[in-house]
Every structure is written in C-alpha cells, then in structure tokens.
Amino acid sequence: MLERWPEYDPAEEYPEETRKLIAAMNAIKSIRNIRAEADAAPGKALTAVILPKEGEKETLEAGERYIGKLANISSFTYIDDKTGVPEEVMSAVTPDCEIFIPLAELVDYKAEIERLKGEKKRLEGEVKRGEGKLSNRGFIEKAPEKVVSEEKEKLVKYKEMLAKVCETLEMMEKKI
C-alpha cells in the first residue's frame, strides 16, 4: 500500500496481440451462442468451418488453441468462399469471420431461423442507431472527430454483418 502507482508505458502496449485475443474471444462467444441456441451439450466436441475476412486468417489461427479449448472445437477448416460450407450448419458472424458449425443431428431449422431473425433485428437496430447518430447535426458538430469516425466505422461493420445474416437467413429458409 506504500508503493507508487504504476506509470503508463507505451512500450507495454501490444496492439497486435490484443487484436488476436479479441478475435478469439468473439469466435468463442459466437460458438457458445450457437451451442446454446441448438441446445448442444457443451461437452460435445464440434468442428468449425471458418470463412475469415480478408487478412484475418492468421489472426484466427493464432487463437485456435484458445477457441478449441474454451469452445470445445476439435478441428478447424478455413475456407475462401461459401462453396466450402457444409449443407447443414448453424452460423455466426463476427467482425473477423463467419463461423459455420455442422450440427446435422442437432439442428432445428426453425430455431436457427428464429435465431437469425433475432440477430437480424439486433443488427437492424444497431444500423438504425448509427444512422440516427450520424444524421444528427448536433452530434456531428459537437462530437470529436475521432468519435464520429468510430461511429462511421461501426455503421459499416454492422451493415456488413447484417448483409451476411440476411444471406444466411435466406439460405436457411430455403431448406424448410
């Protein structure tokens, strides 16, 4: 209690490692959400088919050990386009990739469609919120430029995620 407070040292920042860890955490969270939606047992090892965004494959590969251990994924397959996606999957979209989990024996297509509709609704709300903020002249004029640019980046990210969710939802509705 008599020691001095630590002082900030920019040399102790690790932006690349932080980015890798955040990508792994997003993947783990998404896979766990898929498991919960499918009522899949947490102890059942699954395989993951991952469609990384451009330049993100190495980032995701760096986190495989954590993803495998914490989301119980036994094997990873990376694909370049959706032609490599198995027939029966549940999917999730993260800022770094799309994750497809083959759950043929556990998939309830109606439940997956409902989950995707919920995700679509959430993303539509985020897009609407972002567009509302960016169309507000008071926000644009008063907010620091950094905050405005961050909001613009978030809006682009949410629009991309919404497009992917809509595409997956359309694919799933064709299965029924």
Image: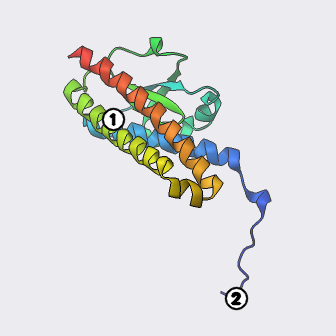
Residue positioned 33% across, 35% down in the render: 120
Q: Position of residue 128 (x, y in %)?
A: 39, 43
- Check disc 2: other Cα within 10 Å, few if <14, some if 14-19, many if 20+: few
Q: Which residue is at the far bottom?
A: 2
Q: Which residue is at the far front?
A: 137
In the drawing, does residue 6 fall left or right of residue 122?
Answer: right
Q: Position of residue 103 (x, y in %)?
A: 31, 24
* The image quarter in which residue 11 lies: bottom right
Q: CA distance from mark 2 to mark 1?
A: 53 Å
Q: Tell me how many marks there are.
A: 2
Q: Position of residue 98 (x, y in %)?
A: 47, 28
Residue 151 visible in rendering:
yes
Q: Which residue does the numbered mark 1 point to in the structure image?
A: 120
The amino acid at mark 2 is Leu
Query: Which tag, 2 or 1, sits closer to the chain's start?
Result: 2
Helix or strand or loop: what does disc 2 sit on? loop
- Check disc 1: other Cα within 10 Å, few if <14, some if 14-19, many if 20+: some
Q: Quadrant of the N terminus?
A: bottom right
Residue positioned 55% across, 17% down in the render: 80
Residue 90 visible in rendering:
no
Q: Quadrant of the C terminus?
A: top left
* The image quarter in which residue 124 lies: top left
Q: Nearer the viewer, residue 121 or 12?
A: 121
Q: Position of residue 118 (x, y in %)?
A: 28, 38
Q: Which residue does the numbered mark 2 point to in the structure image?
A: 2
Residue positioned 51% across, 15% down in the render: 81
> From the viewer's perspective, is residue 103 above or below residue 3?
above
Q: Nearer the viewer, residue 151 or 14?
A: 151
Q: Nearer the viewer, residue 14 or 120?
A: 120
* The image quarter in which residue 36 lies: top left
The amino acid at mark 1 is Lys
